[in-house]
Image (spheres, rainbow, N blue to C red):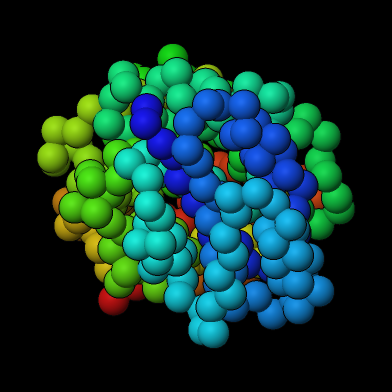
Amino acid sequence: MEALSILIPVYNWDCSRLIEDLSAQARVLGIPYEIVIADDCSTDIHILERNRECAGSTENCRFFALGRNMGRSAIRNFLADKSKYDKLLFLDCDAAVRDDQFIRRYVDAADKASVVCGGAVHSDEIPEKGVELRWVYEKNADKERSARFRSRNPYARFTPFSFLIDRALFMRIRFDESYAHYGYEDVQFGCELERMGVSILHIDNQLIHLGLEKSEVYLEKTRQAVQNAFAHKDEVEGGSRLLTHYNRVVRFRMRWLFRGLWKLFGKQMEKNLLGSTPSLRIFSLYKLCYICILK
């Protein structure tokens, strides 16, 4: 690797500690590097200014505060446009490094594939009351997040939470900006990597994911993601379990059944999912019923 651009989109999250940790690790690499932060029109001015101040006092760090909210795809494309080095390391802002070798592991793996994914993990203890749905979902998903497991289906396991990519390759693909809301822009990106035959390597270099939303917020974001999956089902079919199940329902002409389940039990399912002990089976059924009522 000749040089590294570390790119972090931010929205209403204090990432000053992450900036400091990354800067400390990058300084010892012996290669040119930069850290580029783009705030996607945060509504919390105190957080925005704290991040701006931290970036301003950090070596080789640039900060952009956007005047309008661009969304998850466009903000990453914006960061890539602002980058200047041959390798791009995209990281989500609501993360913490586990040790002081995080960036070095990416540097060591950089020449082994065009895309390198490090992965994510979550705390063994629920961080706060009210985030049970997201925490239960993520802790269950952590069972399948080792590099060995992700490598079994490498493209479907792509995630933008933490990944390294050749800049020239990213500029050819980019994130699809028609995904205005949460969900499935990462699935389409992984499908595009597969269609292009791009080499992808999964390594055990997990970041700790800290930003778990309240259950009400996460349920709304889940509905947005299902809407995205439905709107882009031709592009992301191969990378989505939900669409696999949905297509099976359509093939057997059973949409009426899941529409009926939604009408009869939708509120009861939501009550469970917003409670202290949400069921992942009910969560899966909820998403399948919801996609079946979309037109």
* Displayed quadrant of residue 239: top left
Q: Position of residue 268 (x, y in %)?
A: 65, 63
Q: Residue 188 in the image: x percent, y percent?
A: 28, 52
Q: Nearer the viewer, residue 145 or 103?
A: 103
Residue 212: % across, % down: 70, 52
Res 122 seen here: no
Q: Is residue 39 above or below residue 289?
A: below
Residue that lies at the very extreme toward the left in this rendered image: 196
Res. 25 in view: yes
Is 41 left or right of 185, judged from the image as shown? right
Horizontal side of residue 127 vs 72, given as left or right = right
Q: Residue at x 41, y 36 (%)?
A: 3
- In front here: 65 or 43? 65
In this rendering, the count of numbered labels is: 0
Q: Along the horizontal axis of the image, is 148 left or right of 48?
A: left
Q: Position of residue 284 (x, y in %)?
A: 50, 48
Horizontal side of residue 21 vs 32, given as left or right: right
The residue sitting at 69% across, 62% down in the picture is: 56
Placement of 192 over or under 78, stated as above or below: above
